[in-house]
Image (cartoon, grey):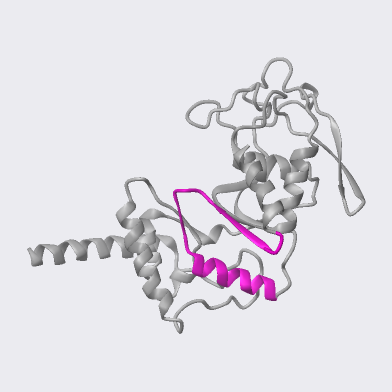
Amino acid sequence: MKALAALNWITKYCGDAKYFLKADDDAFVNMFAALKHLRDVQTAGFRHDLLICLVWRHPSVARDGKWAVSWSEYARRRYPTYCCGLGYIVTADVVALLLSAACSRHIHYPYVGNPPSDDDATGSPANLLVHDHVIDRDNVIEKSPTSDVTLERIFWIDDVYVTGILVEELAGLVRHTDMSAAYCKSDKMAAVYRHRTEWSKYVFTQVGDDEAELYADTWNALLQRAAKRTIGLRSPSTIWPGRLADRYIPLRRMRHRTRNATVMGRRTASLQV
């Protein structure tokens, strides 16, 4: 409901905005790179039908652990393709489409009978009860099967629901655009955002609750780097949504740089003591 409320708020109060960025509260967001990329894609004419993210293609449904989902909640072995919830970028028209898909979904029944066996990769279609429903966009009518979710409530994993189930319901009106190269983990962020060229090629990094100091230090370093406007922020040779650069230094080398910087920092601290 929180995710749908956000979509509804956007459609009501953000009529002049063309692009929206969603980020989790544990995401480090390089706004300099994000804004530069959006200026590039807007200039190149990519202003509609965009859902840009780290794309997860049909991952398995977890049946135990923190993100466990029961067969009564979701009756497939795999989710539809959806976006990593850490962060993604979407155009205003897609926001409206996602909200309309949520509002037009038919209440329907979940999985009936015994769950598929482990050797059944997708679940037998004969065991899935679905309805057809209609989505009208510019008077073009599309029919698609609804996803297999219980009728009592909206599916509780919001990123799966908004960027997966609803996208699937839109029957090809919205497609995921991959931006996976612009994501990195926190063990590499110190090196990445301090690097002369690589700092402008990443947008999202997940930062743990115990990494507040790393977050603050990296942001301050990023501000200093971004202030040098002659460095970085280069556009790729071909402008395409989700493509921030022609080439990247491999992240394994970034990790090596981070380790070396940490060792040198410790040595410097020891000398100062």
Look at the picture and state if 67 lies above or below 232: above
Q: Residue at x 55, y 31 (%)?
A: 62
Q: Which residues are magenta?
A: 15-43
Q: Residue at x 74, y 39 (%)?
A: 102
Residue 82: within the magenta? no
Q: Is residue 247 left or right of residue 115?
A: left
Q: Is residue 138 left or right of residue 126?
A: right
Q: Position of residue 52 (x, y in %)?
A: 64, 57
Q: Position of residue 232 (x, y in %)?
A: 47, 77
Quadrant in which the C terminus appears:
bottom left
Look at the picture and state if 72 lies above or below 93: above
Residue 57: in sight, yes or no?
no
Q: Residue at x 65, y 32 (%)?
A: 155
Residue furthest to the left: 273
Q: Position of residue 186 (x, y in %)?
A: 39, 54
Residue 137: in sight, yes or no?
yes
Q: Foreground residue, 155 or 245?
A: 155
Q: Foreground residue, 157 or 121?
A: 157
